[in-house]
C-alpha cells in the first residue's frame, strides 16, 4: 500500500472532544461524497485514490501515473510541479489543465493541488478539480513542442520573460530561446502576432487573452 493511501486511510473518523478547532467526523467518507472531483497521488507519482466524482470525470485511473492523464503538451509541466511539491519547494498549484480521460477525451479543467504530509514528511499530492469546461479544449499546434506550447500560453496570459522563467523553473536565456523558436514555428514576428495567430488557429485555452483586450 502506498504512503499516500496509508496517509488518507489514517484520517481520524472522529475527533476527540478535547480537540478544539479540529475537523470532526469522517473526513474520508466526506471526501468520497464530495461532488468536486478529488484525487491523491503517492510519492512515486501514481494515482492512488479518487473519489466517485473524479472517477466519473476521468474513469478509474487508479494505479496509473498522474502524467498519463495530463495532455502531452502539459505533462512535463505537471511532472515538474509534482517534483517541486515532493521536494517541499512548491506549496500549492492552481491553474487550467487539459486532462485526458480513460476514453481518450480531452477536458479542460481548473485544478488545485497541495502536498500531502505525514509527520512533517511529504508523502504525495492531494488535488481537487473545482471546475471543468463544457467546450472541448484546443488541440496543440502541430509545429510547437510541449515546452513552446507552454510558453505560448504563458505569454497569452500576460507573463513576461522573467515570469515565464520563474513559472517553468528555467533560466531567462532558455526562456528567450523557447520564445524565439515558438515565434519561428508560428511564422510570427512578435509576441502579439503569435497570440493573434494562435487565436486564429484555435490553439489557445479559454483563459488566454485576445491581443489588445486589456
Image (tube, rainbow, N blue to C red):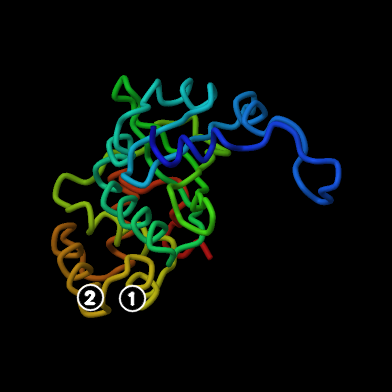
Numbered tag placed on residue 198 in the rendering: none
Q: Which residue is drawn at 39% across and 21% down?
A: 60
Give the image quarter of residue 130. Answer: top right
Q: Where is residue 9 in the image (x, y as percent from the top left)?
A: 54, 33
Dot 1 or dot 2: first in sequence order is: 1
- Considering only vertical position in the picture, is 37 above or below 96? above
Q: Where is residue 96 in the image (x, y as percent from the top left)?
A: 45, 47
Q: Tag 2's secondary structure?
A: helix
**Location of mark 2 (residue):** 176
Q: Residue at x 18, y 53 (%)?
A: 144
Q: Residue at x 29, y 41 (%)?
A: 67
Are the residues flagged by discs 1 and 2 in contact, CB closer than 8 Å? yes
Taking depth in this image into account, of 184 and 11 the one nearest to the observer is: 11
Distance between mark 1 and mark 2 Cα atoms: 7 Å
Q: In this view, does 13 lie to the left or right of 58?
A: right
Q: Position of residue 213 (x, y in %)?
A: 50, 61
The quadrant in which the N terminus is found is top left
Q: Is residue 38 left or right of residue 196?
A: right
Taking depth in this image into account, of 96 and 35 the one nearest to the observer is: 35
For label 1, the crowd category at 10 Å Cα-Cα, with few meaning under 14, some 14 to 19 and many 20 or more, is: some
Taking depth in this image into account, of 25 and 37 the one nearest to the observer is: 25
Q: Position of residue 89 (x, y in %)?
A: 43, 67
**Location of mark 1 (residue):** 161
Q: Which residue is drawn at 54% across and 55% down?
A: 119
Taking depth in this image into account, of 19 and 63 the one nearest to the observer is: 19
Q: Is residue 214 left or right of residue 21?
A: left
Amino acid at each position: 500500500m502506498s504512503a499516500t493511501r496509508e496517509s488518507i486511510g489514517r484520517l481520524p473518523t472522529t475527533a476527540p472532544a478535547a480537540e478544539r478547532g479540529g475537523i470532526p467526523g469522517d473526513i474520508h467518507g466526506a471526501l468520497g461524497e464530495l461532488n468536486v472531483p478529488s484525487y491523491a497521488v503517492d510519492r512515486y507519482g501514481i494515482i492512488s485514490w479518487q473519489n466517485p466524482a473524479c472517477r466519473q470525470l476521468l474513469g478509474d485511473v487508479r494505479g496509473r501515473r498522474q502524467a498519463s492523464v495530463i495532455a502531452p503538451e502539459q505533462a512535463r509541466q505537471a511532472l515538474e510541479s509534482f517534483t517541486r511539491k515532493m521536494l517541499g519547494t512548491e506549496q500549492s498549484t492552481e491553474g487550467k489543465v487539459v486532462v485526458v480521460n480513460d476514453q481518450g477525451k480531452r477536458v479542460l479543467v481548473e485544478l488545485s493541488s497541495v502536498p500531502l504530509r505525514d509527520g512533517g514528511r511529504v508523502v504525495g499530492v492531494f488535488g481537487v478539480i473545482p471546475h471543468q469546461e463544457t467546450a472541448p479544449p484546443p488541440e496543440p499546434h502541430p509545429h510547437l513542442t510541449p515546452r513552446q506550447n507552454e510558453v505560448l500560453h504563458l505569454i497569452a496570459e500576460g507573463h513576461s520573460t522573467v515570469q515565464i522563467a520563474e513559472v517553468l523553473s528555467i533560466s531567462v536565456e532558455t526562456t528567450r530561446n523557447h520564445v524565439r523558436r515558438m515565434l519561428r514555428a508560428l511564422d510570427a514576428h512578435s509576441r502579439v502576432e503569435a497570440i493573434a495567430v494562435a487565436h486564429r488557429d484555435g490553439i489557445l485555452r479559454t483563459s488566454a487573452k485576445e491581443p489588445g483586450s486589456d
